[in-house]
Image: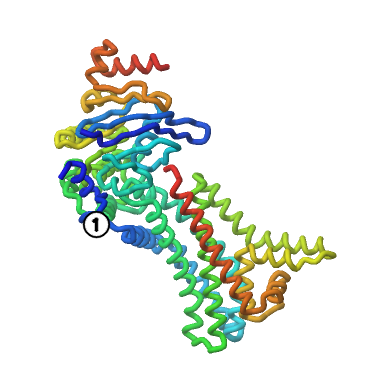
């Protein structure tokens, strides 16, 4: 065997496709990085607080707000604001604090896409778990009436989507901005823009353009914003048109409940993939 | 024998700053190659490109005849000591060593010996952020040497070390060399380079200004020691 061939075997580059002893497969790396980061996230108190917050809120609404359905409607507004906020801000902080770890791992036999996958799972999984456990625990303890089970499931789905979208957005933001303060400011800006400012601008436009047919623009506006989509998903389920706002009402009239739900679901999936793909692409090209 | 690392037409710029402007370089097996140059001459960027931390704008890096482009397995055979050591906050040195062993899927045969040599025993279970800069540097040395890699990349390895640790590290470099390993290092201390290296690469403004054996450089510049020889070249360059 030539010296080069021997070295290839040692490095694990041998082209036969066998994984030599002493090398770790890609999936294993993703899992290891994910588990390691998961431990780090679990150690921080923020995550526990986040879960407890939803548990306390759901418990309070159940206790003082009447039935299961009312409690879920009450939760909606908070979920639509808090889940995106925590997802994007916690996510950005997580990535800045993992910087040394990332730099260290990149000097090891770890591919960048594997490292990215591990970082993504290590952030998303605990956030989703805290949200799901926090919200559903008070309902499950009391027992969920059959007619409210669908609503609870929709609430959890919407919250998981919002976590995926906003914690996902933390990746391109933190990867592109070296400065922590700048990254955090940008995260807050994106959150404020998509949750509050966006709706205000739409309302303003509707007000200004009151004499023109605004159904289609309003429909497009609702389709573009993940928070609007999550709201529509929830309110279609709850069937409370009064809370739906103009875009939601147009949406329902245009698509109807079932198709509307499917469309919202589809676009939210795109919104989940986009930040992941963009972050991964930038991460692969980044200089450390 | 074919060089361990072959670099062809390597270019990299950060924004408007051209850091590497066409580097062609072969790093031979089993010897110590020192990269010298002013601050900002591109030494660290060159090293980080070899490691894959910095992605080149153009040009290629080959490790053992294979082009390195987003490839990771070759780093199984590389140990790296960065210039500015940065470790995850809450980790202890022991956690760190275990994590690296876990990632590489093998145990580091040399670990205990290195820990003993640097007298790191009492520091192993303290969080890395509480350790002094010099101690962290030693931990970093252990991570670089413990897998007995084919290639050691050491970016100013002795900067920040006390004289005792510095000479221990130099002994370690010497031993690795004797065992036929390839070492690439940077340093500003010329006596150290003279002591350790076989070959010198002088970088200036992102280009290689001189490349040759330490002995030849002394003769070429007509200076008796390397410090003066390099200083003379740097002055000519400036």
Q: Quadrant of the N terminus of chain A?
A: top left
Seen from the viewer's position, the closer of residues B218 and A41 is B218
Q: Percent position (x, y) of residue A131?
A: 49, 71
Q: Quadrant of the C terminus of chain A?
A: top left
Q: Percent position (x, y) of residue B111?
A: 19, 48
Residue B160 is at least partly visible in this image = no
Query: In the drawing, does residue A274 fall left or right of residue B40?
Result: right
Query: In the drawing, does residue A96 fall left or right of residue B132?
Result: right
Vertical relation: A207 (above or below) A62? above
Taking the spot 24% from the left edge, 57% from the top edge, the residue there is A18
In what element is the residue under mark 1? loop
Residue A265 is at least partly visible in this image = yes
Q: Residues within 10 Å of mark 1 (few under 14, many from 20)?
A: few
Residue B199 picture quarter: top left
Residue B156 picture quarter: top left
Vertical relation: A34 (above or below) A241? above
Vertical relation: A282 (above or below) B163? below
Label 1 chain ID = A
Taking the spot 61% from the left edge, 85% from the top edge, the residue there is A66
Q: Residue furthest bottom?
A: A146
Taking the spot 37% from the left edge, 61% from the top edge, the residue there is A34
How many labels were placed on the picture? 1
Q: Percent position (x, y) of residue A63?
A: 56, 83
Q: Residue furthest top?
A: B222
Q: Percent position (x, y) of residue B4?
A: 25, 36
The coloring applied to the image is: rainbow
* Residue corresponding to mark 1: A18
Taking the spot 26% from the left edge, 51% from the top edge, the residue there is A15
């Amino acid at each position: 065997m030539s010296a080069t061939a021997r070295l290839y075997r040692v490095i694990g580059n041998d082209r036969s496709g066998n994984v030599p002893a002493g090398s770790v497969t890609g999936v294993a790396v993703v899992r290891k990085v994910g588990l390691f980061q998961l431990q780090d996230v679990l150690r921080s108190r923020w995550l526990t607080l986040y879960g407890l917050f939803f548990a306390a809120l759901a418990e309070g609404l159940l206790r003082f707000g009447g039935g299961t359905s009312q409690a879920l409607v009450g939760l909606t507004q908070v979920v639509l604001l808090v889940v995106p906020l925590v997802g994007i801000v916690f996510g950005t902080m997580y990535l800045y604090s993992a910087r040394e770890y990332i730099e260290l791992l990149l000097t090891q036999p770890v591919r960048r896409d594997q490292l990215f996958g591990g970082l993504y799972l290590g952030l998303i999984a605990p956030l989703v778990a805290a949200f799901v456990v926090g919200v559903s625990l008070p309902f499950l303890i009391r027992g969920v009436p059959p007619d409210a089970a669908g609503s609870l499931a929709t609430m959890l789905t919407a919250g998981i989507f919002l976590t995926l979208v906003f914690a996902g957005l933390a990746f391109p933001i933190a990867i592109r901005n070296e400065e922590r303060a700048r990254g955090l400011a940008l995260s807050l800006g994106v959150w404020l823009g998509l949750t509050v400012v966006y709706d205000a601008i739409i309302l303003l436009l509707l007000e200004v353009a009151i004499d023109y047919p605004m159904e289609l623009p309003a429909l497009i506006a609702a389709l573009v914003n993940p928070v609007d989509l999550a709201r529509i998903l929830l309110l279609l389920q709850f069937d409370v048109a009064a809370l739906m706002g103009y875009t939601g009402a147009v949406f329902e009239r245009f698509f109807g409940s079932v198709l509307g739900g499917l469309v919202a679901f589809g676009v939210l999936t795109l919104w989940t993939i986009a930040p992941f793909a963009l972050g991964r692409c930038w991460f692969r090209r980044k200089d450390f | 024998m074919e060089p361990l690392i072959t670099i062809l037409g390597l270019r990299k710029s950060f924004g408007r700053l051209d850091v590497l402007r066409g580097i062609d370089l072969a790093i031979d097996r089993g010897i110590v190659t020192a990269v010298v140059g002013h601050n900002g001459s591109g030494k660290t960027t060159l090293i980080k490109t070899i490691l894959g931390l910095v992605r080149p704008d153009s040009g290629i890096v080959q490790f053992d005849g294979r082009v390195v482009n987003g490839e990771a397995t070759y780093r199984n055979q590389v140990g790296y000591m960065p210039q500015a050591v940065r470790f995850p906050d809450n980790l202890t040195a022991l956690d760190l060593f275990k994590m690296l062993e876990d990632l590489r899927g093998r145990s580091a045969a040399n670990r205990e010996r290195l820990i003993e040599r640097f007298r790191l025993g009492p520091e192993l279970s303290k969080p890395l952020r509480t350790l002094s800069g010099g101690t962290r540097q030693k931990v970093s040395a252990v991570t670089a040497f413990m897998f007995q890699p084919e290639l050691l990349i050491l970016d100013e390895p002795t900067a920040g070390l006390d004289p005792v640790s510095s000479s221990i590290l130099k002994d370690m470099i010497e031993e690795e060399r004797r065992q036929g390993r390839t070492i690439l290092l940077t340093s500003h201390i010329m006596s150290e380079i003279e002591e350790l290296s076989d070959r010198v690469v002088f970088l200036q403004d992102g280009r290689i200004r001189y490349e040759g054996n330490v002995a030849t450089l002394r003769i070429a510049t007509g200076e008796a020691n390397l410090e003066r020889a390099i200083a003379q070249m740097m002055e000519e360059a400036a």
